[in-house]
């Protein structure tokens, strides 16, 4: 078998050598051409391990050394500049070392510029993020089911991991309302601590108001009733509780009074608004009221040195469930039944028996966490008046006593849970809750409702049977 290798015989050795030489020459020529071709392309850099610089052929014949200023035939890249993608060339290692002190200043300057650019970019991103966050927390954009942005709100961040019992969620709240200097204020208006109440709590007696104090309390209660009726007129689907709070605040201030809840143990608003499963002390926010809601508005005013306290539960819109209607009516009449029995000599603890007995027949329950209380010169004082049966309240009614009865009635179980804002109380099972409250004065023969409804007060939406409760 034969192969493709060409062999030379003895007679043609000379020709063979010529062919071999010719072939070698062509190879050398091809190699030279390849080298020449490479010289026209970008130089291939390589790092000299013994000198910490990058060496390569210069791309531009006009490049000069950063050290001595001479034209470069070959270039050495400063490794720091190369890392930062800066063209900085030197003619030799020695020139690079001599120039290092001056040249290194450029690194510092460049580093500062880079940091400034990075900081500028960071602030730009931060500004964009802030704009997005602010936009998402605006009432018109706010999604109460999305907790993503709650961490950026001082009020909402308290609820990040909270398990809600019902459907109501917290919304952003506005700043605390301003009170002009000329308004007479209670002792906690600035410090948030009711020092006078804390001193009084050391006593166990029930304060008996004199005739002058009673007249001032009556004036405060009339203003309280006017304020609550005004708040009632504002209730409508789409209206926010924040809007109600602001208008209530302005109304009270225009009448030269102070909204008692404001800054009381740091409560941030001028009234309490409790919607659906919220039992009491709801903080007004940007949530719009919905058709079918029920809302309790709790009004307290400080006027001429004394407090008045009252609240009512209202229907929002027309689409009210029968369950909500029956609950609200039951709560109202349980209060009126208890008031009917008030007179000198009656035990305060018996009020709870009357309320609980009436409510139980309707298969509702009475909240046990919160009670009625004395009111007048102090926002809250003795007696403490529980609304459930078999309570341990102390005290007997005497003429001159001024106090509130304010039962909170739940559709389901009586248990409640406190929200992380340390004020809002909600039913533990998420079912509805209703409340009504009056400030009362014990007289020589019976009791007087100081916060009673006016003949022209807005309707509660049901027959209040006033002829049965002429007191």
Image (tube, rainbow, N blue to C red):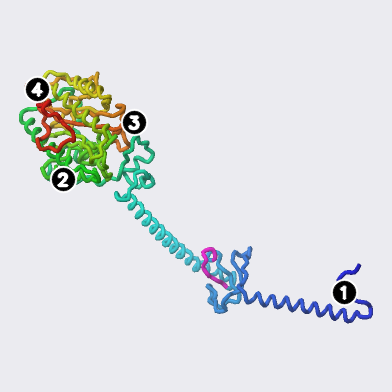
Q: Which residues are magenta?
A: 82-90
Residue drawn 34% across the image and 40% down it: 158
State the mark number for residue 446: 4
> Which of the two labelled residues, at mark 3 and mark 1, occupies the earlier sequence position?
1
Distance of label 3 from label 1 (alpha carbons): 102 Å
Rendering quarter of residue 338: top left
- Res. 231 image quadrant: top left
Q: CA distance from mark 1 to mark 4?
A: 138 Å
Residue 250 numbered mark, or none: 2
Q: Residues within 10 Å of mark 2 (few under 14, many from 20)?
A: some
Which of the two labelled residues, at mark 4 and mark 2, occupies the earlier sequence position? 2
Q: Which residue is mark 1?
A: 6
> To which residue does mark 3 refer?
429
Q: Nearer the viewer, mark 3 or mark 1?
A: 3
Q: Position of residue 20 (x, y in %)?
A: 84, 77
Residue under the point 39% across and 46% down: 148
């Amino acid at each position: 078998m034969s192969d493709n290798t060409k062999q030379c015989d003895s007679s043609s050795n000379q020709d063979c050598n010529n062919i071999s030489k010719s072939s070698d020459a062509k190879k050398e020529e091809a190699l030279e051409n390849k080298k020449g071709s490479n010289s026209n392309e970008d130089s291939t850099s390589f790092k000299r391990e013994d000198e910490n610089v990058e060496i390569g052929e210069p791309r531009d014949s006009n490049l000069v050394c950063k050290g001595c200023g001479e034209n470069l035939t070959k270039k050495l890249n400063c490794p720091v500049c190369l890392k930062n993608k800066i063209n900085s060339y030197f003619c030799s290692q020695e020139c690079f070392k001599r120039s290092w002190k001056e040249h290194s200043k450029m690194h510092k300057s460049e580093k500062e510029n880079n940091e400034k650019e990075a900081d500028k970019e960071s602030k730009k991103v931060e500004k964009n993020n802030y704009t997005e966050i602010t936009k998402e927390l605006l009432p018109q954009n706010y999604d109460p089911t999305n907790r993503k942005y709650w961490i950026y709100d001082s009020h909402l961040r308290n609820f990040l991991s909270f398990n809600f019992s019902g459907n109501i969620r917290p919304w952003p709240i506005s700043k605390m309302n301003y009170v002009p200097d000329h308004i007479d204020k209670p002792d906690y208006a600035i410090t948030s601590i009711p020092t006078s109440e804390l001193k009084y709590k050391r006593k166990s007696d029930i304060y008996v108001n004199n005739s002058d104090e009673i007249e001032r309390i009556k004036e405060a209660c009339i203003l309280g009733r006017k304020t609550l009726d005004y708040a009632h007129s504002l209730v409508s689907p789409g209206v926010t509780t924040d809007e109600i709070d602001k208008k209530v605040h302005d109304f009270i201030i225009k009448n030269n009074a102070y909204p008692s809840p404001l800054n009381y143990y740091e409560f941030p608003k001028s009234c309490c608004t409790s919607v659906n499963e919220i039992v009491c002390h709801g903080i007004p926010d940007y949530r719009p009221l919905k058709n079918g809601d029920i809302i309790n508005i709790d009004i307290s005013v400080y006027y001429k040195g004394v407090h008045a306290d009252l609240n009512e539960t209202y229907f929002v819109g027309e689409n009210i469930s029968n369950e909500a209607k029956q609950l609200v009516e039951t709560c109202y009449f349980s209060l009126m039944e208890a008031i009917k029995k008030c007179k000198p000599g009656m035990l305060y603890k018996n009020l709870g028996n009357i309320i609980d007995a009436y409510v139980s027949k309707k298969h509702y329950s009475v909240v046990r966490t919160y009670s009625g209380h004395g009111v007048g010169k102090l926002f809250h004082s003795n007696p403490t008046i529980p609304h459930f049966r078999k309570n341990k309240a102390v005290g007997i009614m005497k003429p001159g006593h001024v106090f509130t009865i304010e039962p909170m009635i739940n559709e389901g179980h009586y248990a409640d849970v406190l929200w992380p804002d340390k004020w809002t109380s909600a039913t533990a099972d998420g079912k509805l809750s209703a409340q009504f409250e009056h400030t009362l004065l014990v007289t020589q023969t019976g009791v007087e409702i100081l916060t009673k409804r006016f003949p022209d007060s807005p309707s509660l939406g049901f027959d209040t049977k006033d002829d049965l409760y002429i007191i």
